[in-house]
Image: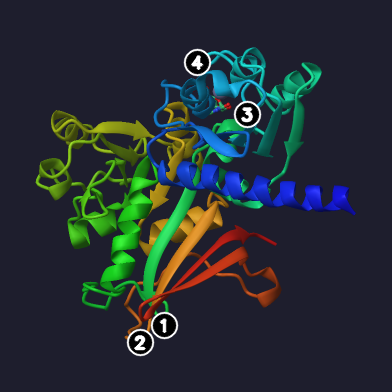
Amino acid sequence: GEGGMKEVQMAVNDEFYMSLALDMAERAQGQTGINPVVGCVIVKDGAIAGLGTHLERGSGHAEVHAVQMAGDKAEGSTVYVTLEPCSHYGKTPPCCELLVEAKVKRVVVACEDPNPLVAGSGIDRLRRSGIEVKVGVLRERALRLNEKFAKYITTGMPYVTIKTASTLDGKIAADTGDSKWISNAEARLQAHGLRHRHQAIMVGIGTVQADDPSLTTRHDGVDGIQPVRIIVDSRLGLSPEAKIFSAGETPVIVLTTERHDAEKAKLLMECGVKILVCGSGPAVDLKTALTELGRMEIGSILVEGGGTLNGALLKERLVDRIILYLAPKIIGGKAAPDNFMFEGIHQMADAITLDALEIEQVGDNVCISGIPVWP
Ligand code: AOF
Ligand code: ZN
């Protein structure tokens, strides 16, 4: 009947405006630090009255901008927000109070805020004030968008993405060390977008010595947000002549062990390097390292090689997402390095698998992204 039609129309509208709010949030990825990306759309009498996006940690939340734009029209409106409005005093006051004061009629939320300080209490507060709240519109998309935030805010540990590019036979370089190029230009451009969306980039000393990378970001043809640069270097082999010191201005953090050479440490510190001593073993204790980096408010790390570091992180179960670009090339070579180098498993039943697979063709390359699962 008539009532049913109205409900269908409302559900269509809810997705229509929520997807706009998600689009806005999506474009702000990489610029909010440890904070989530959030979009907000305010609709009054069938027209958009306000738009807002959280752009930077410490500055206004999405709802603040949208309510300000809506002005008097906020009263009696429907508010679409990609994350539950906050209920706590952080760097900014609680958004649910703002919505109550603005006398909005209805709030549509994509997903709950995983921040333990909020976690449902924003939604409760709105409902107790008599505001109608609908939760879960385009939830999956909203959760995927803030997966890094969710990991960091609930564990204090950075979200770790491994990005790697290999030939069909899993090689990330030839046996001579030559690796330019394995993936195609479009795939390499996407990788810069990934750098933009992580707070730090991490590589092993082997990669620095082989490629002498600058580890900076060029995003959409312009300089993107530059990640902090982290090098895993248990014996402090890093040269003060490395390109990372002349290119780029973000901090360089070197992870090493108690066994490092004090003289070399002094030399590197003179170049501005921050040295983190992680464990006393022959190799860097990666869990200790990530815990310390989390404490420094680094909430997401993009690991870009090489195979030894990838393998070690995988073995320690410290990886949250793997993004693999596969190029239609075969190079062989026993000494050519692989994507993931660690003492392997012995039975297929014990294999590490990828869950929630996303597969995309990028020109003649294939991008496979997924969440590692350990048996
Ligand atoms: C919202 N809308 O746009 C954002 C929210 O330190 P603050 O004040 O920036 O607060 C950060 C926390 O607020 C963050 O951990 C998350 O729980 C929430 N983020 N909430 O209602 C927004 N960015
Ligand atoms: Zn807020």
**Residue 110 located left or right of residue 40:** right
User: Are there few (<14), some (14-19), or many (20+) residues within 10 Å of tag 1?
Assistant: some
Camera-nearest residue between 235 and 167: 167
Give the mark nearest the N terminus, 4 or 2: 4
Q: Nearer the viewer, mark 3 or mark 4?
A: 4
Q: Secondary structure at mark 4?
A: loop
267 in relation to 215, above or below: above
Q: Nearer the viewer, mark 3 or mark 1?
A: 3
Name the residue that disc number 4 marks. 92
Disc 1 marks a residue whose amino acid type is: Leu
Inspect this view and state whether residue 292 appears. yes
Q: Secondary structure at mark 2?
A: loop
Label 4 CB sits under 8 Å from any ligand 1 atom: yes
Name the residue that disc number 2 marks. 330
Disc 3 marks a residue whose amino acid type is: Asn
Q: Residue at x 22, y 48 (%)?
A: 237
Residues at marks 1 and 4, CA–CA distance in whole angstroms: 49 Å
Quadrant for the C terminus in the image = bottom right
